[in-house]
Image (cartoon, helix red, strand yellow):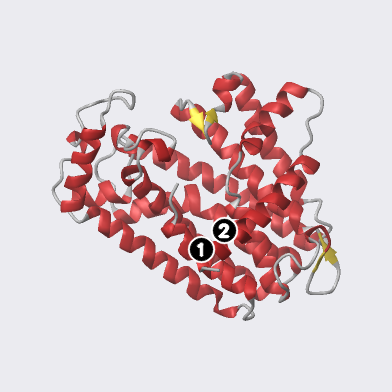
Amino acid sequence: MTRQQAVEKTITRCRQQVNDAIKEDLPVEHPERLYEASRYLLDAGGKRLRPTILLLGADALADVEPNSQPYRRFPAADGKAVDVLSAAVSIEIIQSFTLIHDDIMDDDDMRRGVPAVHREYDVSTAILAGDTLYSKAFENILRTGAPPDRSVRALSELATTCTEICEGQSLDIEFENRDGVTPEKYLEMVELKTAVLYAAAASIPAVLLGYNDAVEPLHSYGLSIGRAFQIQDDLLDLTTPTEKLGKQRGSDLVENKQTLITVHARNHGVDVDNLVESDSVDAVSETEIEEAVGVLEDAGSIEYARETAREFVADGKAQLDMLPDNEAHDRLLDIADYLVEREY
């Protein structure tokens, strides 16, 4: 089995457990329309990368083989049982909440191959669905059975993470109308908008299970690979064919979204604002995007982004040196690489 096959097998296994747990922890109840809308994107799919990292983190810390212990009754450092699967569901619920609200703000039509929640239902229902998921995530993380001090610390981590995600989203919107964005400012935005949820996923099992010395290293691991994940997303938006991407290739460029690629290009004299003539995603042609990508490649901007992502992955992997040498540790290392090697 290749390394990539091992990673994908692990993700598939964890995804199935998380999907089953979502049905248990977030049932469709009265009022049905609200909970159907809340579950809509969760049921539509997704790799479940963040909860996978959380479950693997628990396995690595406890020095057990992946999936060898029941995640609903997982052994903590003191030998008591903690429901780390509930924490994993909380992380995925937060991810879904952010996607619903992102799609409303961007007026996007599709997500995960299905109509966005505000298209399938309506804007008001979508806002309520997002708000419901937001609160349900906090309810869920308080159901792990961890001692009160650990539960409160995990809850605090999740609440801070949600605030930071909103801060990052605000910066992302602000950057659309700013030309003087530096790589440092862009990476700050990425850390807040994307990486902090990876950091929470990686560190929360250490909090709940009582491995205090591992909290900060795992948090740093999540921040680093989360930054790499977002940079890779930006690269895939430009380099992946539209039919495989599931949305118009180059849409970030058309919508004037700042990425590490365009920030670098501007700093090297590229007229990024005029790389494509079309001012709407529906109107842009593949030829326009191809020509724009060629300019960005010639400027070294695409390779710069790739190299930066690889550097973040290397930094994240180094943070795992404090973990026991076991299979779960290996999978966390492999997932870091997977995030910058993946394709849609």
Residue at horizontal 31%, vertical 63%?
307
- Classify residue 207 by image quadrant: bottom right
Circle 2 residue: 8
Between 68 and 302, which is closer to the camera in this rendering? 68
The reply to whether residue 304 is visible in this rendering is: yes
Residue at horizontal 61%, vertical 62%?
202
The amino acid beneath tag 1 is Gln
Residue 174 lies left or right of residue 265; in this view the side is: right
Residue at horizontal 49%, vertical 44%?
167
Q: Secondary structure at mark 1?
A: helix
The reply to whether residue 206 is visible in this rendering is: no
Mark 1 neighbour class, 10 Å CA radius: few under 14, some 14 to 19, many 20 or more: some
Instruction: Assign the N terminus to one quadrant of the image.
Output: bottom right
Mark 2 neighbour class, 10 Å CA radius: few under 14, some 14 to 19, many 20 or more: some
Residue 142 rendering spot, x and y as whole percentages: 79, 51
Q: Secondary structure at mark 2?
A: helix
Q: Residue furthest left?
A: 269
Q: Is residue 63 above or below residue 283?
A: below
Residue 255 lies left or right of residue 77; in this view the side is: left
Q: Is residue 261 above or below residue 325?
A: above
Q: Which mark is residue 4?
A: 1
Residue 145 lies left or right of residue 123; in this view the side is: right
Number of dots carrying numbers: 2
User: Would you say the residues marked 1 and 2 are in contact, meaning their CB atoms lie under 8 Å apart?
Assistant: yes
The amino acid beneath tag 2 is Glu
